[in-house]
Amino acid sequence: MSSAGGSQPLWLLLLPSPPREVTPSSVRSSYASTISQVLQKAADTSSSFSTVTILDVAIPCDASNALEPFYYSGLQNLLGQLYKLICLLCAENSIDVQYGNDVDVRVLLFKEAKIEGPFNDTVQVVEDDPSVGPLVSLRRLACCGRPWQRVCSTDGDDGEILLQLFLRLRNEAFDDSKGKIVIERFPSEPSYPASTSLKTPDDRVIREHHNAVAVGGTFDHLHVGHKLLLSMTALVLNSNVQPGVKVERSLIVGITGDKLLENKKFCEHLQDWFQRQAAVQSFLLDFLVVNEPLQNLSSTMDEKKEGSLGRIVMNRLPSDLVIEYVEIFDAFGPTVTNESISALVLSGETRAGGKAVNEKRAEKQWTSLDIFEVDVLDSAEVDPATSDCGTQDFQNKLSSTEIRRKLAKKSGTAD
């Protein structure tokens, strides 16, 4: 199950709506001050308790019409810019595994809440059908059952309204009135005008319902690049499931087998397959918990077995969603053994791999996979005028090899 059920501190940061144009500068101007303060406090907690604080960062997106198609690029751009900013702020503030103060950040998206009339103690939230579209309602987020110990927000009007709506909806489902959740407001800087839509001019409209989606990777020492890739995979998966309608869905994660990684640098700090699988599972279940019915993931069933490709772990969720973690030994994995897969999510640097997969499927006279590309997070847009972080420091946060090197240096085993 999710790491949230353990002893790690679990915090939530509620951010106001994104700026009208989601760019590195606008995202930094809108959120850097607040996120930096929360990260520093979370890092202090990690250091004090010798553990890693989990920080869920939740941000609303436009929900003017829940039946609108899924605009892939707009959501990916928002998630990517937020993860890039978080990575920069961690580098700037020396928050890292090598300092013993790391923070595990997960960005969650939800549909912007609409209210009837001016905000007051009796205002009603106007909600879209929470089962339609890739994003959930504020109510679903508030009532998902995540055991947050601290909820952080911004001190402006928008931040306060969002916080009060969240608390009201949560208190309707849980008794948090006895100090179970600490509320903390953080100063924020004036933001850009709020977005009315995340659609970009050249956006890709997703109208297909993909019931079997695949993604693959090594996933060693899970970092923000991995998190972006896994998040977009979960969002591509068909979420247009009406209540009472049984639709079997599969999210298939190919994870590189240990034998293929024996020659990696600093291999003594390489996580084994089950450690990497557990990290991916923890992230995905935490990301998906807000999309599941209100009984959340309490009835998740885990299965471990040996398959034709190697080790397999399966999570069976209450909503008939099955997550399969499959050990792979080549670049193809289950994409050429499972005909039901209809979509593949990959990073821009592995674009050629998607073409090779479809060529293999064509040889079998199978339908080609719909390829979804995730941008590579890099230092190209790091502005030295606004960031105290060097490009190398930024890149090091996005490299499993560099994370292993830091661990080796910390343990005294680095050359």
Image (cartoon, rainbow, N blue to C red):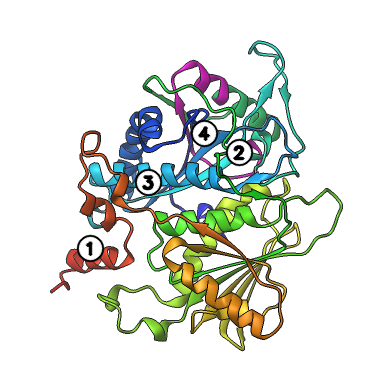
Cα separation, mark 1 vs mark 2, equals: 35 Å
Cα separation, mark 1 vs mark 4, equals: 34 Å
Q: Position of residue 322 (x, y in %)?
A: 69, 66
- The residue that mark 3 highlights is 84
Give me the residue at 49% from left, 79% from top. 331
- The residue that mark 1 highlights is 406
- Name the amino acid, label 3: Lys
Badge 1 or badge 2: first in the primary sequence: 2
Q: Is residue 48 visible?
A: no
- Name the amino acid, label 1: Lys
- The residue that mark 4 highlights is 181
- The residue that mark 2 highlights is 110
Q: Position of residue 195 (x, y in %)?
A: 54, 28
Q: Position of residue 304 (x, y in %)?
A: 61, 78
- Name the amino acid, label 4: Ile
Magenta stretch bounds = 142-162
